[in-house]
Image: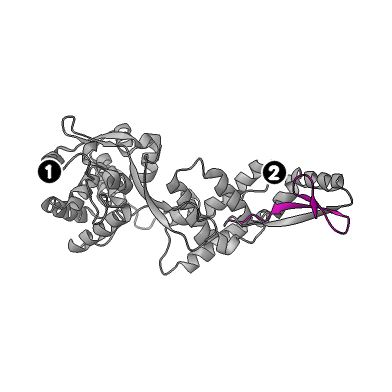
Amino acid sequence: MSKRGENIYKRKDGRWEGRMKENIDFSGSYRYRSVYGKTYKEVKEKMNAMKQAPADNLCQDTVEQAAWLFMQTGKNDWKAGTYTAYYQLLKKYVLPHLGNMKLKEINSRKLENFSILIKEETKENPLSKNYLSQICEIVRRIIIYMNKRHDQEIPVPVNPISKTHLQQTELPSESSLMILEEYLFAHCIEDTCLGVLMAFHTGIRIGELSALKWGDIDMEENMIYIRRNLLRVREEGIEDSIGKHSTQVIEQSPKTIDSVRAIPIPPRLVPLIVKYRKEDSMYVISGEKKPWAEPRTIQYRFKKILHKCDIQYFNFHLLRHAFATRCVSKGLDLKSLSEILGHSNIQMTLNLYVHSTIQQKKRLMELYDAIPMSRQIQGQSPWPILENPLC
């Protein structure tokens, strides 16, 4: 069989055959589609026509094919942690249920049914509404991406788990936080306890704590400088092994440009940091086999600390929520708090990390109750109280 041009061959039967890649899937595999004609020119024109007909191609794309294109296009722009998070959402939840469906078939009702199915499958270990919303949102983002790629308008379904329906994060009680703080202070000789205590009083993320070195702490200025983030991501080159992928721990710049920041050290921590400080090149929290402890190791150690304190388990990240809420309750201005947390704006801080406590709500009602009462309530009104108001 002779070949001429771009993947175009002359067959033994005299016809010309052009081969085009299609059906690219999430794992990176594909198959060829053949186009036939009596002449090379005829086949070339057919192939060009197919390439220039995005509407037809878009209508035939499955969710899995579109997901692969979405991931490959964004791979160079996203941080490794973002790519890994998207990959896991797609691999674990989206593709098993929607992967073989045509992209154009995904409407609001099907996306809602999909969310109900995921909730049913995970009822023994329920997903948070926020995480479920992220699963649905990535499907919407893929459709938006494909619309832009092909200059088409497939209707974008509504996210059935909208932000207005997300549940408010339940913070640990103040009594639990006090017990935890006392334990951490008493065991600061252990680097994990000292590191967790720093997060407790600064609101830094677990990945930032994992990457924190003693050289990032300036005791002359009494500042902690957040410069890096440590996280576990999918290892490159494992595109064709869904369900069987390896991971690696990497160190990268913080989450956003606003996350590179300087945080004043709370005075209560200064003596402890001075007492237990180590060489600048060492990590604040060390691992058993590595010089650093990755986030999931810190999370595991944190769980053991809560168990020792007889405190009901809560995720490490809730320390960040509790820090922000405490700051607001003490009157810290939101602009300063937003910068300490590494947020791009104040509204993000309010939406994500500031929660009212039951004590604050009771205090609000006490303040409201201090408003002068009407004479009717005080028993001084000139209007008598009717015993039978229908008469």
Amino acid type assigned to the residue bearing label 1 in the image:
Leu
Task: Indicate the position of residue 9 as horizontal and vertical percent values.
Answer: 80, 52
Q: Secondary structure at mark 2?
A: loop
From this viewpoint, is residue 325 visible? no
Residue to which mark 2 is pinned? 152
- Residue depicted at 87% across the width and 55% down the height: 15
* Residue in the foreground of this view, choosing between 286 and 339: 286
* Residue in the foreground of this view, choosing between 106 and 160: 106
Quarter of the image where the C terminus is located: bottom left
* Residue in the foreground of this view, choosing between 146 and 246: 246
Give the label on residue 216, or none. Answer: none
Task: Indicate the position of residue 389 as horizontal and vertical percent values.
Answer: 39, 55
Quadrant in the picture for residue 282? top left
Magenta residue span = 1-26
Q: Is residue 296 left or right of residue 100?
A: left
Residue to which mark 1 is pinned? 272
Task: Indicate the position of residue 175 as horizontal and vertical percent values.
Answer: 19, 55
For the residues labelled 2 and 1, the Cα–Cα distance comes to: 60 Å
Q: Is residue 182 left or right of residue 358?
A: left
Mark 2 surroundings: few (<14), some (14-19) or many (≥20) residues within 10 A: some
